[in-house]
Image (spheres, helix red, strand yellow):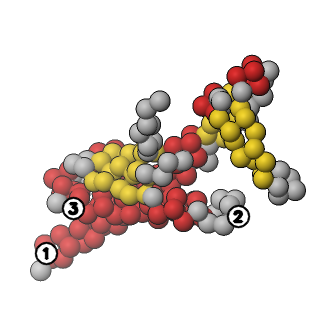
Amino acid sequence: MSAKKPTTAKQSFYFQPLVRKASAKRVVLNRVKKEILVRAGKAAIKVIRQEIRRSSWKKPPTKLIRSFSYKVGANIVTIESNHPAMKFLEEGVHTHTMEYLKNKTVPIITDTGKLIFRKATAKAMEDGKWVHPGYQGRHFIRRGMKKAHREVTKIIGDWISEEAFKSLEMVTK
């Protein structure tokens, strides 16, 4: 069996729709587009981390929280996580037979806290045992991107207002 490549969860939002929403001229925004995209990336990471912290965890998952980064392209910010479980936490997992455990010995902690070992056999899987119950995705990235999108739209609006006032001041001088 070959080693699996670690999965990453990523989501992006594009700059051009933000520009149209703010109804500003592209020429003016091109000067500060990168700065705005960097702010968008930082805002998205901040919101995603807040979303994770406020979720129900026994203790905060610091490795997961620290796993996020952003990349700025020409017109895009991409949010990524290199945490091996992030894709599954974001999207969820369907109920499935855990074929990947076939013929392996699996450690299990009982309700009393005792450690026992069970072998996942082909027969047990045929009998409907070793079924993962599945769970819904938590959508940290999706929620974070939506909130960051709103924040960035406000940042763009504020910047446009500042630029307009600067232009008016220059004209009136």
- Which of marks 2 and 3 precedes in the sequence? 3
Disc 1 target residue? 170
Which residue occupies 21% across, 61% down?
A: 32
| Separation of residues labelled 3 and 2 (CA atoms) | 42 Å
| Separation of residues labelled 1 and 3 (CA atoms) | 19 Å
Q: Which of these two is toward me, 89 or 2?
A: 2
Q: Is residue 23 visible?
A: no
* Residue 154: image location, x then y, percent: 40, 61
Disc assigned to residue 86: none
- Quarter of the picture containing the C terminus is bottom left
Q: Amino acid at mark 2?
A: Lys
- Indicate the secondary structure of the residue bearing disc 3: loop
Which residue occupies 52% across, 58% down?
A: 64
Closer to the camera: disc 1 or disc 3?
3
| Separation of residues labelled 1 and 2 (CA atoms) | 57 Å
Disc 2 target residue? 58
- Indicate the secondary structure of the residue bearing disc 1: helix
Q: Amino acid at mark 1?
A: Met
83 relative to 54 in the view: left or right? left
154 relative to 159 in the view: left or right? right
Which residue occupies 16% across, 53% down?
A: 27
Bin the neighbour count of mark 3 within 10 Å (Cα to Cα): few under 14, some 14-19, many 20 and up: few
Bin the neighbour count of mark 1 within 10 Å (Cα to Cα): few under 14, some 14-19, many 20 and up: few
Closer to the camera: disc 3 or disc 2?
2
Disc assigned to residue 32: 3
Residue situated furthest right in the rendering: 112
Above or below: residue 110 compared with residue 38 = above
Q: Amino acid at mark 3?
A: Val
Q: Which of these two is toward me, 15 or 50?
A: 50
